[in-house]
Image (cartoon, helix red, strand yellow):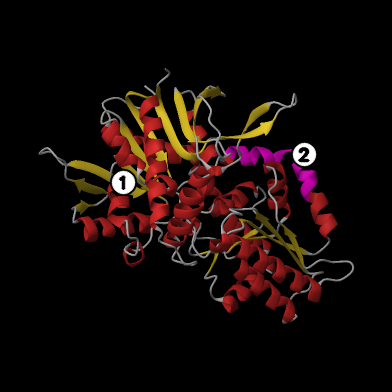
Amino acid sequence: MTRADLVIVANRLPVDRIEGPDGEPAWRRSPGGLVTAVEQVMQGMDGAWVGWGGQPDLDLEPFVFDDTLLVPVSLSREDLRDYYEGFSNGTIWPLYHDVIATPEFKRSWWDAYVRVNRRFAEAAAEHAADGGFVWVHDYQLQLVPQMLRELRPDVTIGYFHHIPFPAYALFAQLPWRRQVLDGLLGADVIGFQRVADAGNFQRSIRRLLRYPTKGDTVTVPTIDTTPRTVISKAYPISIDADQFLELARRPDVIARAARLREQIGSEKIMLGVDRLDYTKGIRHRLKAYGELLADGLITGEHVTLIQVASPSRPGVEAYQDLRDEIEITVGRINGDYSTVETTAIRYLHQGFPREEMVALYLAADVMLVTALRDGMNLVAKEYVAVRQDNTGVLLLSEFAGAADELGSALLVNPHDIEGMKDTMMRAVSMPVAEQTRRMKTMRRKVIENDVAKWGKKFLADVNALRPREVGE
């Protein structure tokens, strides 16, 4: 059996199963942000990826795709209902996003979460080389580090948390709070998006487990006399800036952006690109934009809003309700303020290939990122990266992780509708000189601190704990 020096463990494999040209099942690389981030780290390495294959009851043997060993973990429909839609997205997701929606604490969901996390840990343990490195990703798999440590004490374990980690007062509501902390502390290095998230985690450690913390470290007692030192700190994730710059320079993408502007026809284009999720602040954005139209401060001829809302978790009732609410709001605004020639909001409930997204970024005068709570928000960084002429305005929620790095954006509190309206008006009327000054500063940060640098920083701390470096 093939064993790998580097094993990635994530909820999904980095591929999607499709029908091939001959009618047989085939695989294609997934466009997700995690895939893009981690593949930079895996280049040229003996790597494996453990994850779900994307379809229920899909029982497959490990296989090689683009020189990476893929290890599918089978999940039944019941697993998906209770572990994924249930505990991961009905309990952890809303709890960790400031209880914007009410989390549910069901014991059957927790039992499924434990069961599925163990399945992932066992698959990783089976395919990790002696003394290898296993990198676990995100909130669906918070128990895997400790389970894996029990199975394979010889490996080094990293964990990266892609979403916010909540303040103690919120985290303490979780009935299984100690088990989750113990699960995470199975890792040697634990990464978060923001300094505040790492601080929230350490406060929970001190309050609930009474383990000492100092700086970026947690001291974890062990059965023998030597305690373990766990590194716990912020590693803000980023994008493959070069890849986006390459797309932004392509003549066909530039031409597509010009056609979009011509077809839309308004003087200014505002753009929102989000998963259809209640954490993204889409409702607040629409409310502010609708009120600007109602107040007569803008018209459809002056400003058009394009809202891309890619489908997300259709099996979760809160997401079904959100889609209904947003589509009713869009219909009402368009009914009141569109004309035969213009449409106030172009609403698109679908995903698009990266080339089309870059064309939209190039066409948009203002990018709206109004998340109520977000671990990072890579869309903000993608928009900044492609604006090579240093024009364009980023309106960014102060509650998105990207706000820590992109302080030259127009920062807003999305709960403050009047404040957001004022900032939208400032954005559409901002002089080019001010746009250039702000965008240059942000682009420099995004290009210098790209995803490769993120991976190197994380691995540097991992390698400091290992007898030999990853990739030696």
- Residue 183, label in figure: 1
Instruction: Identify which residue, 470 or 227, lies in the foreground.
Output: 227
The boundaries of the magenta stretch are 242-257
Asked which quadrant contains residue 422, the reply is bottom right
Asked which quadrant contains residue 371, the reply is bottom right
Are the residues tagged 1 and 2 within 8 Å (C-beta)? no
Local SS, label 1: helix
Q: Amino acid at mark 2?
A: Pro
Local SS, label 2: helix
Tell me how many marks there are. Answer: 2
Q: State how far apart marks 1 and 2 are (Cα).
A: 49 Å
Q: Position of residue 421 (x, y in %)?
A: 63, 75
Q: Main secondary structure of the magenta part?
A: helix
- The quarter in which the N terminus is drawn is top left
Mark toward the viewer: 1 or 2:
1
- Residue 416, label in figure: none
- The quarter in which the C terminus is drawn is top left
The answer to if 255 sits in the magenta stretch is: yes
Is residue 399 visible to us here?
A: yes
Residue ID at (51%, 33%): 39
Measured along the vertical axis of the image, is residue 248 above or below residue 179? above
Residue ID at (37%, 46%): 114
- Determine which residue is flagged by label 2: 251
Residue ID at (68%, 78%): 291
